[in-house]
Image: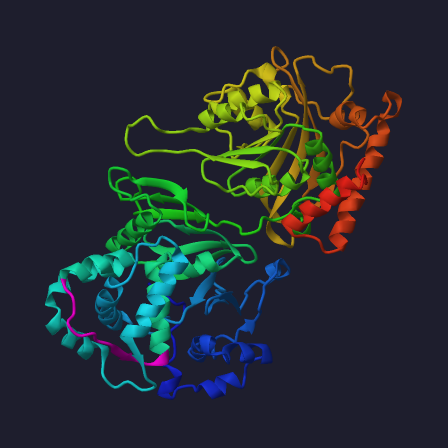
Amino acid sequence: MEDLPFNPLPAPINGRRSREEVHSKLSSELQDFVGREENRHILDYICRLPLEEIEIPEFHLKISRAMKGIKHPNLIYPVGKGVAVHIYPDKEDIRNYYIPIEPCLFQNMDSTLEVVEKLLIDVINDQDIDTKDPEEKKKLLEKALEKVCTIEEHVNESAEKKSKDIDEKKTVLREKNGKLRSGFIGNLKEAGKVFKMKKRESIRVTPDEFKAIEYLMIRDKIGMGMLEPLLMDSNIEDISCSGLGRVFVEHKVFSSLKTAITFRETEELNSFIIQMSEKVGKPITYRDPIVDTALPDGSRINIVFGEDVSRRGSNFTIRKFMGTPISILELIDFGTIDYIMAAYMWMMLKAGMNCFISGETASGKTTMMNAITTFLPPESKIVSIEDTPELQVPHKNWTREVTRTTREDSGSDISMFDLLKAALRQRPNEIIIGEIRGVEGGIAFQAMQTGHPVMSTFHAASVEKLIQRLTGDPINVPKNYVDNLNVVIIQSAVNVPGKGMGRRVLSINEIVGYDSVNQAFNFMDIFKWDPATDTFNFMDIFKWDPATDTFKFTGRNNSYLLEQKIAPRLGIPENQVRRIYSELDRRAKILRKIHQAKITNFYDLFNTLIQIEEAGLTS
């Protein structure tokens, strides 16, 4: 249900504020945009805004992170398929509004849709609707709608009267209406078996009504219903509903926003969640009230159903799937990392060092791990293991493994532990684990022990906490195995002075050893876990300075891995190991030049790095 933050004015056709009057006040770019037939409803939306209270929104075909500092944004941008978004300012709240402008926004189509659905039963029953391809379903539905809708500029007959006429002929279908509205096209076929019309009927609608009908039918029957505009918007990272009330989103540019989508009744929320679970092929029930799976577009969704396990009512969270992963150069643009740190990770991963990206929830761990996969040797065989597929590895020889959980006690579950054991038999050059949080951690460290490079994310806010969790229940990695882990990136979402919320690499750390290992080296920032019995030696190589929002290379001329591991592999004599830092600076310059050439796309960057390696520019 749409819950707008303003009282809309009457429609422009009612004479309150004409389209021509508002159109003349728009920027030339917005005039061109709303002048297209498919975008006329966006002009109608602007006509109904309280322009005495809020100015005409700015229009942007694309938005960028440079707009992040706008305190009270008032702008419109398109997300595709005739849908635009209005970021509406709320000066009394930390969150602004996110309003999807859909073709159906101001149209009450309930009674008309009832008629259309009844008419579709006969049309769709005669066609092949067993396809699982969403595009095929969409084409089928579009053709069927054209058959049951007669488009006229002016329609005097009300949808209610048309519905009454058809009801007299099709009373048997009354019991099926509720199911039709919420189900897939397959429900229409089922209902068609109950009754078949002797004479094909149609409903007369205006062009605007037809556009709204077509949009709603495709959105609700094939897409994810009212959430579809949010899933279409590539600027949204997360969608969350905490129970009754508004749906919230995390926006790449405007941070946390409250949407115009609201659930007011428990029955309405539960019905929507049941529909969602059915669409992803994992029906939810009171017996099995939790679902963690992927949407058709790859987005990750977690659903909790029922008030007995969630006191505020059923809830869900969707982590959006990125079509093209964010590259390491884009992360440099965002301020998450800098060139010298990226060059350091390039050298570490090329040399087969084991790496964990650690941090709290929503700190950008998976994004970072995905970004640095471009530094893995291009000829490598990669095996990834995840609960829900999120990784996108650019290598051609990539085996993607996903866990399986069954609802019945059939013993057919496939855990990360199972997949990791299988991966060790596949002779991988790199094992990537979506997240280590259980007994699979022991196998991961055994893999490191036997020479299989491992990369993973981990939930811990510091190296100390990471070691504590690794060596404690339920992971229980032996303490003398911990030094098989070479590099730990600590990442967090932080409040950057003058820039708002952002993600930053707080530190990059080298794990040097356990107990008295490497005591001969005079390294800085040695952390002693327990001086009496357990000593873990690690050091900060890079640290983020929150005062200046810059990164300090605290490990220059003092890196154990660069001097003792990487330098010998590059043929640098023991008495000249400091030359490794010149190589590090050279790689940072290469990355800067690639960036200056505007090669920032994830896959383009990977291909460029391959060309550089083949040309011998990094040897």
Query: Residue at 49% of width from left, 59% of height from top?
Result: 233
| Scheme of image coloration | rainbow
Q: Residue lying furthest top in this view? A: 533
Expressed as whole percent of the image width and height from the top left, the position of residue 215 reads 37, 68
Magenta segment main secondary structure: loop
* 202 within the magenta span: yes
* 542 within the magenta span: no
Can residue 106 be seen by looking at this rendering?
no
Can residue 282 be seen by looking at this rendering?
yes
Q: Which of 183 and 513 is in front in this view?
A: 183
Expressed as whole percent of the image width and height from the top left, the position of residue 197 reads 16, 70
Q: In the figure, is residue 243 to the left or right of 515?
A: left
Instruction: Assign the N terminus to one quadrant of the image.
Output: bottom left
Expressed as whole percent of the image width and height from the top left, the position of residue 348 reads 70, 32
Query: Residue at 54% of width from left, 58% of height from top?
Result: 254
- Count of all numbered marks drawn on residues in the image: 0
Q: In which quarter of the image is residue 65?
A: bottom right
Expressed as whole percent of the image width and height from the top left, the position of residue 307 reads 27, 44
Instruction: Assign the C terminus to one quadrant of the image.
Output: top right
Asked if residue 200 is positioned above or below residue 266 in the image, the reply reads below
Q: In the figure, is residue 249 to the left or right of 558?
A: left
Q: In the figure, is residue 135 to the left or right of 120?
A: right
Q: Which of 604 and 580 is in front in this view?
A: 604
Q: Quadrant of residue 447?
A: top right
Span shown in magenta: 195-207
Q: Quadrant of residue 596?
A: bottom right
Query: Residue at 26% of width from left, 53% of height from top?
Result: 271
Query: Residue at 58% of width from left, 41% of height from top?
Result: 393
Q: Nearer the viewer, residue 509 or 42?
A: 42
Asked if residue 476 is positioned above or below residue 359 in the image, the reply reads above
Q: Residue lying furthest right in this view? A: 575
